[in-house]
Amino acid sequence: MRRLPIFFVVDVSESMVADLPKVDKGLQMIVKELSSDPYALETVFISTIAFAGRCKVLNPLTEVYSLNIPRLPLGGGTDYGEAFTCLMREIDRNVVKTTINQKGDWKPLVFFFTDGNPTSSSYKRVFDKWRNEYSRKASVIAFSLAAKLDYSILGQITEQIYLLDDMDDETVKGFFKWVSASIQTNSVAVGDNKIVSEDRLMKDEAGEKVHKINLKKESRTGRDDIAGDESVRVVIGKCAKHKKRYIDLYRKDDVGIFLEKGCFAVPDEHAYDELSSSTGSGSDLDMSRVQHKDNCNCPHCNNPVIITKCSCGRIFCCNPDREKSVDGCMQLDCPWCGNTGYYQFGSFSVGTGLG
């Protein structure tokens, strides 16, 4: 049987923390839709690859009827190079090639999801390898989940780039319905050795908040030194009571102000460490020049202050109304280093993750 291999390559970096549950739900919806389609059941095999600073294959190519995509993890960094290195390795290992004696699998479809620019320049070497050795072997469709991407980077591997203008529930549902419809349509079309244009399916399923990027209008920045996504800041904190990590997320608005989007628990700290880049960090964030969100509390203990900076440089939460006071200062124990310190309210900058 000739298979239609589908690869979902999903950005699970820190900046995705608010939207990962929606992407999780969308991927499950795709599997459910395909499970009711006889053509898809016969031909479609799906693999899911999660990437941040490192990458991980969540499931190898698996037939739809027995597929159970694991919950998406979270990591630090957005390394396109790691993502495509992992993808090329999976294609080599698991996609059956056509030979004189047998017909191989159909040409794979790769759905690449990201909300950030790459945080490592490794993609340049890897993209060269993709263009030279794999561009004819697989079709890549890229989806931007944020408006401030440098699309010229993704344009080096595909002209099929689409932007979600909004991550509201209705748009996300329509978007994943579109992805599902494109897979279903291609599962029928491969019998005629065709790949269906995504543009033809987009408006019917995804609505007006998903549109194709015109690469001719995108500038090519030619950046060589990449040290994080400049449109986002993520502060990694730890709950003072439960010693669990959280992410305080900020996104830059149109006038350059970083707006706090929320504070989110790190769902699986072991997976987070496994997927995070071992080198590099983002730019410092001046806490006096951000716009804080009301009632943005620690997701673990509900403490109202989530940015408390220890002398060790790390961030943790506190509750000023409950903390012991010594000469007008709060006496606090840092959950990172264990040291006791004395704290007052004031302005300061904090180190950030790669995003």
Image: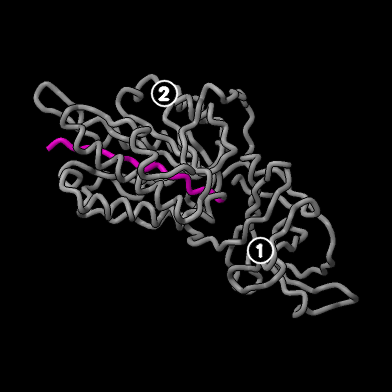
Report which quarter residue 89 is drawn in: top left
- What x and y, as percent, mark residue 346? 84, 61
The amino acid sitting under disc 1 is: Trp
Asked whether, in this view, residue 247 is left or right of residue 271, the answer is: right
Give the residue displayed 73% in from the left and 46% down from the top: 257
Query: Where on the picture, by quarter, is residue 245?
Result: bottom right
**Quarter placement of the N terminus:** top left
User: What residue span does the magenta drawing correspond to?
Assistant: 1-14
Residue 13 inside the magenta-drawn segment: yes
State the residue at coordinates (69%, 52%). 259
Q: Return the mark for residue 336.
A: 1
Residue 25, position in %: x, y? 39, 57
Tell me the residue at 53%/30% (across/down).
151
Q: Residues within 10 Å of mark 1 (few under 14, many from 20)?
A: some
Look at the image and say whether residue 214 sits in the magenta stretch: no
Vertical order, 186 against 18 (above or below): above
In the orientation shown, which residue stands out farthest toward the left?
101
Residue 228, given in percent of the width and then of the height, sits at 62, 40
Mark 1 or 2, closer to the camera: 2
Q: Are marks 1 and 2 in contact (CB under 8 Å)?
A: no
- First in sequence: mark 1 vs mark 2: 2
Which mark is drawn over residue 129? 2
Element carrying mark 2 = helix
Q: Is residue 11 left or right of residue 334?
A: left
Q: Callout 2, which amino acid?
A: Lys
Q: What residue is at 16 percent from the left and 32 percent from the top? A: 191
Residue 99 in the image: state x and y as whole percent: 15, 23
Observer able to see residue 53: no
214 or 30: which is nearer to us? Answer: 214
Q: Is residue 306 visible?
A: yes
The residue furthest right is 327
